[in-house]
Amino acid sequence: MDTMRERFTASVSRLLDADPRLAVVLAEISADGFREAARRHPDRVINVGIREQLLVGAGAGLALTGMRPVMHTFASFLVERPFEQVKLDFGHQGVGGVLVSAGGSYDWPAGGFTHMAPGDVALLDTLDGWTVHVPGHADEAETLLRQAAAGHDKVYVRLSLQANAAPRPVTGPGFLTVREGRDGVVVAVGPMLDNVLAAVEGLDVTVLYATTVRPFDGAALRAAADRASLPGGASDVVLVEPYLAGTSSAAAGDALSDRPHRVLGLGTARRELRRYGTMDEHLTAHGLDPHSLRARIADFLTRLTRTSGAETGTGPGSGSGTNAGAGAGTEAGVPTGARSGAGAGGTRTEAAAAG
Amino acid sequence: MTSTTTDLRYGYTDLPHLMSLMTGDEKHGPAATSTLDALWVLYDRVLRVSPATAHAPGRDRFLLSKGHGPMAYYAVLAAKGFFPVSLLPGFGSYDSPLGHHPDRMLVPGAEIGSGSLGHGLPIAVGTALGLRAQGYGDARVWVLVGDAELDEGSNHEALAYAGAAGLSQLHTLIVDNRSATHGRPGGIASRFEAAGWSTVTVDGRDHDALHAAFTAPHPGRPHAVIARVEPKSPPV
């Protein structure tokens, strides 16, 4: 199976043949993958060297002339390093473009923290109008890249070496219902799906699958929560994201602001691990392997009855996570009627970091 | 060389008055007018763009990267008819499209929004690349940066690449009023020359010299014009 990044270079190379509006801007990374395309389209495959401010700024200049720029490098150097260029040269200038990253949060653990970008989606969340795709399979990545290349707006496509074994259909920007249950809703983002499905085996929960996290499909989450909650009961939602824990907790809280709810945001820890090793070791360290996920999800879903309204903060990730809520158990212990600010009060962000 | 407009009421001598509509002062110090002469010569005698062609895909582009102190820019755009002079008195007010830094989404004729320094030259590189890729090989891209703005590292990413790539459609106008705290040992032109640019250093108040510098041939290379004006602050 090819990686998402290999699929990216192959599919966008073909798109360059078909769409004269398309241009690819590189900063050395993946230049080999576009070598043949660059021979065919020397004016539209542009490698600016190791210059990431120029990568994004030049992409915006291309967009200002009416072209569709696809800008690519590792996530840390595409979103974090030239963030002001992303903010101003696209948003403020009022033009669109496609940012395609590789590396994600833990694709190259041996490379260390300099090559990890767990905060990329959270950073883009501070800006208006960015669509964020997080494919979980190379086939999904290709579909999303084709859509992004054909569009006009601002799109971020987050490619990873982590992938699910099988692709799911990408039918639109909405969440896909993978299975249904009655005890809660788990939203699995992109490459987290396989681990989530393994983790919830035997649990009576709904699993929604998101390859597009912005815009956040609040309608699908509400509908799933309706089906998975007793009438008048609280909605329990777990988000499992392959980047900073809690990145989508506010979006989920907003979607559920008309009802009592609890949200558990799982993802990578804010605290730097300072470990090398393998992706699996990092997933385990962040509590994102199937075993840890199951323990944390089951604990969250049963905590209400166990703690009876007195949030004690026990759980695999509680020692090192940030708790965005005043107390999830307390909040959900009064599951009657809508309350304002339920998103903040009922939202708990957890990330287990290896101690 | 094509004059873009011929029938407008405003000429160079009207610019101080147009600026006064924004500033309230009939007289302006060197800092406020550092870009005025170069801007006027560009829009009056060099750029092939007018209100009628402000959206034409193959037009020449002028990008004001140094967005600080845009009164001279607004005065020139108004004089050339990109927007009505009646907008000038509202400068900086809530309902005005004319901010203390220009916004391309609000100001007719403004190619980019600027204010944060160091964004214009990279965007100009991409603009030149986009025009070339679409067959508008004759269209020229001009970007104005201040000498102190060259402190920003993003400019050096852009000028190094543009020289290596031989982006001959790209032109940088550096208005040098010696406002960079640490100066530019070796000179501004040397930075561009080392990166493969054609350069001319010229008196930024001399219209004919500016015109000659703006229109000097530079086959296969991007072109930088360093327009020297009075120091922003007198030497101590």
Image (spheres, rainbow, N blue to C red):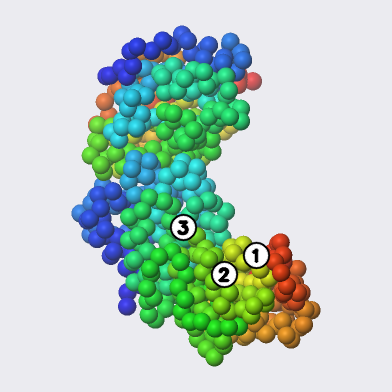
B53 w.r.t. A239: above or below: above
In the image, A16: left or right of A182?
A: left
Of the residues shown, which amino acid type is indicated by label 2? Arg
Tags 2 and 1 in contact by the CB under 8 Å rule? yes
For marks 2 and 1 on the same chain, the one whose residue lies earlier in the sequence: 2
Q: Chain of mark 3?
A: A
Dot in front, 2 or 3 = 2
Of the residues shown, which amino acid type is indicated by label 3? Thr
Can residue A325 be spotted in the picture? Answer: no
Q: Which residue is mark 1?
A: A258
Of the residues shown, which amino acid type is indicated by label 1? Asp
For marks 2 and 3 on the same chain, the one whose residue lies earlier in the sequence: 3
Q: Which residue is mark 2?
A: A222
Q: How many residues crowd mark 3 within 10 Å: few (<14), some (14–19), many (20+)?
A: many
Q: Secondary structure at mark 2?
A: helix
Gap in angstroms between the C-alphas marked 1 and 3: 25 Å
A112 or B80: nearer the eye?
Answer: B80
